[in-house]
C-alpha cells in the first residue's frame, strides 16, 4: 500500500500501519507531504483504508504483491 500524508498527519497514520519492521516514509520533493509504504494483509485492507482516510491519508494505492522473501 502506498499513500500520501502531510507532516501534520504523518504520525497518526503510521500508528495504524502494519509493517514487517517499519513503514517506508519518503519526503516528496519541494513539499510538506510524505509517501508512506507498508505491507498489509489482504484481509485487513478494507478496514484499514477507511481508518487511514480518517487520519488524513490521501492518494491511497493498493498494489498486489506476489511474494515476500524474509
Image (cartoon, rainbow, N blue to C red):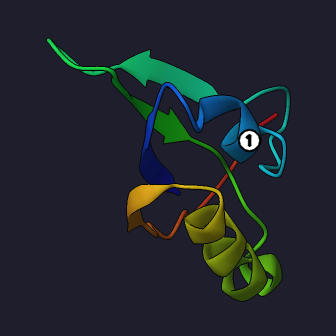
Of the 4 image quadrants, the one containing the C terminus is: top right
Tell me the quarter of the picture where residue 41 sits.
bottom right
Please name whichever residue, 29 or 64, is drawn nearer the observer in this view of the structure: 29
| Residue 30 horizontal side relative to residue 2, left or right | left
Residue that extends furthest to the front in the rendered view of this protein: 8
Label 1 secondary element? helix
Tell me the quarter of the picture where residue 21 sits.
top right
Residue that extends furthest to the left in the rendered view of this protein: 30
| Residue 55 horizontal side relative to residue 64, left or right | right
- Give how far across and how far down residue 56 sits, in percent: 53, 55
Is 23 located above or below residue 63 in the figure?
above
Please name whichever residue, 33 or 65, is drawn nearer the observer in this view of the structure: 33
What residue did someone put label 1 on?
12
- Give how far across and how far down residue 6 sits, in percent: 43, 34
Residue at 71 percent across and 30 percent down: it is: 11
In this figure, what is the number of numbered marks? 1
Is 30 located above or below residue 13 in the figure?
above
- Give how far across and how far down residue 59 sits, in percent: 33, 61
- Give how far across and how far down residue 18 sits, in percent: 83, 49
Residue at 81 percent across and 78 percent down: it is: 44
Residue neighbourhood size for the residue with mark 1, other residues' Cα within 10 Å, grouped as few (<14), some (14–19), many (≥20): some
| Residue 29 horizontal side relative to residue 46, left or right | left
Residue at 56 percent across and 68 percent down: it is: 53
Tell me the quarter of the picture where residue 37 sits.
top right
Residue at 84 percent across and 41 percent down: it is: 15
Amino acid at each position: 500500500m502506498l499513500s500520501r500524508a502531510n507532516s501534520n498527519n504523518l504520525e497518526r497514520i503510521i500508528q495504524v500501519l502494519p509493517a514487517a519492521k517499519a513503514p517506508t516514509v519518503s519526503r516528496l520533493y519541494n513539499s510538506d507531504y510524505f509517501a508512506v509504504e507498508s505491507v498489509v494483509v489482504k484481509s485487513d485492507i478494507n478496514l484499514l483504508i477507511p481508518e487511514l482516510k480518517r487520519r488524513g491519508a490521501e492518494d491511497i494505492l493498493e498494489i498486489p504483491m506476489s511474494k515476500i522473501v524474509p
